[in-house]
Image: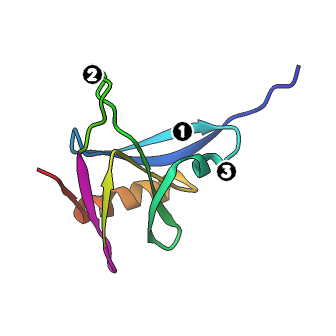
Amino acid sequence: MIITEQTAIPVISINPLAKQIKFGEMESLDKKSFFQSFLKIADLEVGVSLYALPFMDMQSGNMVNKKCFICTDNDIVETEGIGLIPFADKDKAMMYMEKLKKMIEWQY
């Protein structure tokens, strides 16, 4: 029996429905290709990429169309659903989370 060790990837999640930004970790067997299965929305800056997952209403099963806007130095990035921003280490994620709080505008 072969036991494969999982890797924790530091991630900032953006929830436009609850209007929350949270830090967490996602477990993966392959740190390099884990986010390739998600839709990449944009590079917010060098080394910082935004990925998205669809939002589903748990009761109806319908898609929820809540958005948020991230104002970067060069652009305004519109994203729908859950946003995920992976990082190489926890400290960089925590520092970027503080910066992101000033960059984000919620859809009302």
Cα gap from disc 3 to disc 2, whole angstroms: 32 Å
Picture disc at residue 33: 3
Q: Is residue 10 above or below residue 93?
A: above
Q: Amino acid at mark 2?
A: Ser
Residue bearing the label numbered 2: 60
Q: Position of residue 71 (x, y in %)?
A: 27, 69
Q: Position of residue 97 (x, y in %)?
A: 35, 56
Query: Element at badge 1?
Result: strand
Q: For this rendering, which residue is in front, 74 or 21?
A: 74
Q: How would you rate the neighbour count of disc 3 (Cα within 10 Å): few for under 14, some for 14-19, many for 20 or more?
A: few
Residue bearing the label numbered 1: 26
Query: Element at badge 2?
Result: loop
Q: For this rendering, which residue is in front, 76 or 57?
A: 57
Quadrant in which the N terminus is drawn: top right
Q: Quadrant of residue 16?
A: top left
Image position of 57 (left or right of 108): right
Q: Amino acid at mark 1?
A: Met
- Whichever of callouts 3 and 2 sits on the residue coming sooner in the sequence is 3
Q: Name the front one of labels 2 and 1.
A: 2
Cα gap from disc 1 to disc 3, whole angstroms: 13 Å
Asked if the magenta segment contains residue 68, the reply would be yes
Q: Residue furthest left?
A: 108
Picture disc at residue 82: none
Q: Amino acid at mark 3?
A: Ser
- Whichever of callouts 2 and 1 sits on the residue coming sooner in the sequence is 1
| Chain part drawn in magenta | 66-75
Image position of 69 (left or right of 41): left
Asked if the magenta segment contains residue 40, the reply would be no
